[in-house]
Amino acid sequence: MTPTAPDSLTRHLADLIQVQGPIPVSVYMAEALGHPDLGYYMTREPIGRDGDFITAPEVSQFFGELIGIWCVDIWQRMGSPPSFCLTELGPGKGTLMIDLVRALSAMPGAAEAAHIHMIETSPSLADQQRKNLDRAGIAGARWHQRLADIPRGPLIVVANEFFDALPVRQYVRTERGWHERLVDWDPAAECFRFVLAARPAADPEAVPQELKHAPEDEVVESCPAAQALVSDLAERLVKDDGAVLVIDYGSAESATGDSLQAVSGHATHPVLDRPGEADLTAHVDFAALAKAGQAAGAAAHGPVTQGSFLQALGIDLRAAALAEHATPAQQHDLQTAVERLCAPEQMGELFKVLAFTRADHLPPAGFEAAS
Ligand code: SAH
């Protein structure tokens, strides 16, 4: 274990554990990513070749453009309202929004109607997004920390690789029931370690009903923050109309398994080593999200795989049209980008897409085959 600077997040969490005892995995994750001074997203440059990981909007402009076309369709289905909130959760470098708005601008009235609201907790990423939107000639966007700050009215929300950053709790099946997995500090070895709560979890909702009888030693995860957020979004859709598009990696059905993973410099990193210095994520449980949205009165569509979603929106046709006037090197790049986004062994299958609308709407574009 590397020595810990007095102001490091390791020191801060070790002190916290020494005072109050082992902490839930969700607290460890929330602090590692979001501590106001030392959290990963506050201090790092996460996305891009020089960062820790690359996201779909950074692979190709197709991604944001196709989502823009999806948003135009939703806007038209709402009756082309003269004003709506176009909201992105966790916009990274702002690339998705820039590509999305370019596609929106091709439809008369759509870009003019869109009021851009970015939800971002990291001041440095919000700064980067502001600069990049400015450079792309997109004016009038506003930044917020929370969904509750978005004004009322028709709403289209997109979230790419955002939900995987929300803190999960973990529970392990033992012969005495489900015990929460906690993070402890070992002062002798100077490192974090996993331990189990002494008593079984009291919250009957902690473990999904269908997994309650999993074999011993199985781990299940739940993400209360994601469920609460989807529930709030669904309530907004019911009142104000609109749609929410969630794209992330995870499973279509709730499943057992420890999916917590850390990534640094495009390589895996030990989850409990140097929190705040690596990205920390968990797979998204799409079935749990769909249920939370439905319980709040919205219709859930999908999940479908990212590959089938982008193909249904015409990624192949778009690539073929661009390839007609491209050099051989550009054609190769186009082909590589499409494969990276859509091929099952790349992002095409692990990444899923889930949409929410008001219950009286038909399945949106890309989800017709799933219903
Ligand atoms: N959507 C972008 C970035 C994904 S990385 C892309 O596809 O490239 C995750 C993003 O979510 C970052 O911008 C991060 O700062 C932001 N984020 C993480 N947790 C958040 C939270 N609780 N509230 C708001 N933003 C958050």
Image (cartoon, rainbow, N blue to C red):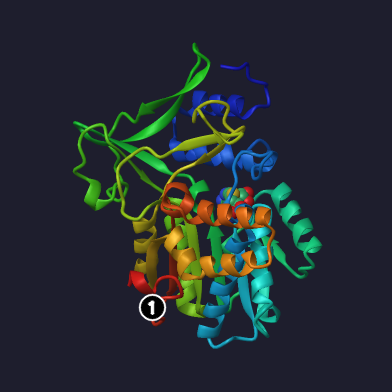
Q: Which residue is mark 1?
A: 359
Q: Is mark 1 within 8 Å of ligand 1?
A: no
Please tell me which residue lies in front, 205 or 343. Answer: 343
Q: Quadrant of the C terminus?
A: bottom left
Q: Residues within 10 Å of mark 1 (few under 14, many from 20)?
A: some
Please tell me which residue lies in front, 308 or 361. Answer: 308
- Expressed as whole percent of the image width and height from the top left, the position of residue 112 reads 71, 80
- Expressed as whole percent of the image width and height from the top left, the position of residue 198 reads 31, 28
Residue occupying the point 34% across, 31% down = 197
What is the residue that sits farthest to the top in this orientation?
Answer: 188
Quick check: 168 left or right of 318?
Answer: left
For residue 141, which quarter of the picture?
bottom right
Q: Is residue 290 visible?
A: yes
- Expressed as whole percent of the image width and height from the top left, the position of residue 131 reads 79, 57
Residue occupying the point 26% across, 31% down = 217
Please tell me which residue lies in front, 352 or 175. Answer: 352
Quick check: 177 left or right of 361?
Answer: left
Please tell me which residue lies in front, 18 or 330. Answer: 330
For residue 364, which quarter of the picture?
bottom left
Mark 1 lies on a secondary structure that is loop
Q: Is residue 90 visible?
A: no
- Expressed as whole percent of the image width and height from the top left, the position of residue 85 reads 62, 74
Q: Establish if 324 lies above or below 111.
A: above
What is the residue that sits farthest to the bottom in this orientation?
Answer: 79
Q: Establish if 276 lies above or below 221.
A: above
Q: Establish if 280 lies above or below 247.
A: above
